[in-house]
Amino acid sequence: MKKPTKKRDPEATKRSILEAAVKEFSTYGLGGARVDRIAERADANKRMLYHYFGNKDALFLAALEEAYTDIRNAERKLELENVDPVDSIRRLVTFTWDYYEENPHFLSLLNSENLHKAVHIKRSKHIQLLHSPFVEMLRRIIEKGQNQKVFRARVDPVQLYMSIASVCYFYFSNIHTLSVIFGRDLSAEEAREERRNHAVEVILGYLRV
Amino acid sequence: MKKPTKKRDPEATKRSILEAAVKEFSTYGLGGARVDRIAERADANKRMLYHYFGNKDALFLAALEEAYTDIRNAERKLELENVDPVDSIRRLVTFTWDYYEENPHFLSLLNSENLHKAVHIKRSKHIQLLHSPFVEMLRRIIEKGQNQKVFRARVDPVQLYMSIASVCYFYFSNIHTLSVIFGRDLSAEEAREERRNHAVEVILGYLRV
DNA sequence: TTTGTAAATAACCAATCAGTTATTTAAAGG
DNA sequence: CCTTTAAATAACTGATTGGTTATTTACAAA
């Protein structure tokens, strides 16, 4: 009756705090996030948060690293050793689109980090070594498409990678203001599908000869 | 000696507070912004901020409205009644690019507003009536290009508008994290120029038959 | 069973926050 | 010159903030 003490489980506690942090930081931004709310959400004592992560900024970096690791792992699972390079690009764009749609916290954390001029990941050895496998994949796909005379010449894979990310990122990152400005609900099923098709068409339209 | 009282100038005071607010909100986000810092930056008493704008959120909305009005005015000045539709699109993309590059606070404010699900501009009659003249401009340019058989068929001007914004917005909004991930300074002159050319090529590549 | 370690807790703190109260004072109209 | 209005100021408030101190307690190794 007097002691509602919890079972000890450091791994679970740490994980719970990290997940709560991802939610809090992506919901309110770094400046608007509250350490007390994270502890409460994680059903953990605030002291444990400082014990495992140090301070608020270090916890934010941990949340960012978590988000980066997740998307890199998802990217790695993508098998694009298809025959048709056009189809490979199509799958690559739709994968990026779907990932951003299903993981809005990733976009939100990136926006916060950019607001703070990337000071956290600049210090992180972990993230800097976490290169996206997409760029190398893209290089091979582009080359294949060029050999088959279906893709244009002189395509920089990094530029293309950024363009694919652009057309997917912008829509979801700005979906609320765009919906107000255009006076229509861009989160509706049909609006999303229309835009997804358009995104693929823009990238392929640029690539094809 | 005893009274370092300022000259009275309500217009100038209000303007000074608004400009300070744009800087503060775009630097720290809505949650990280501090009302005291805005007053200090504006060289005005904090009480005047509440007198002219009401509260922190209302001031944020005023800053947003200011930013939206500025870009819409700049857009309106653009004369695109050229003969060549390809050139018109080129100028439209480079204008968007240049505006985002020169007004990073606009992107930052938009990101903050989207983090808060656009609750401020939803209440603003002012912004909702502030449609971009670009969409109608685009409709005419697209039609001209299609008549001249240089643009593809079935191009939605709203989709194209979003794609143009996308390829410009993403680069500047994410420039800090991208620079760390790719290990190169994307704010460098040559990197920006390379990307600007690519942005134009992506849009034109999609549009051209 | 004993004991060392670290996981967990509650209560606390100085600093800071958005917003307010009470007052003074510059300037325009008569 | 006088009066009225609103622009400007300083000092304050209750609530909240990120972070800490001091203490208790679960559990694995001996």
Image: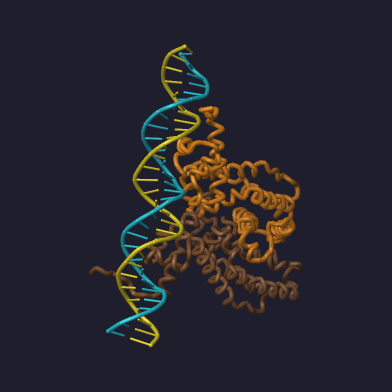
Chain colours: A orange, B brown, C yellow, D cyan
Residue B22 image point, x, y percent: 47, 64
The quadrant the C terminus of chain B occupies is bottom right
- Indicate whether A63 appears above or below B34: above
Residue A181 is situated, as x and y percent measured from the top left of the image, at: 63, 66
Q: Is residue B57 left or right of residue B202?
A: left
Residue B117 to residue A124: above or below: below
Q: Which residue lies at the image location 71% right of the left edge and 73% below the top edge?
A: B145
Is residue A204 visible to us here? Answer: no
Tell me what residue is drawn at x 52 percent, y 44 percent. Answer: A37
Numbered label tally = 0
A172 left or right, relative to C17: right
Residue under the point 57% across and 41% down: A19
- Residue B14 coordinates in the image, percent (x, y): 44, 71
The N terminus of chain B lies in quadrant: bottom left
Which residue is at the far left? B1
> Residue at the spot x=39%, y=75% of the render?
B9
**Residue A200 in the image: above or below residue A44:** below
Image spot of residue B149 (x, y percent): 75, 73
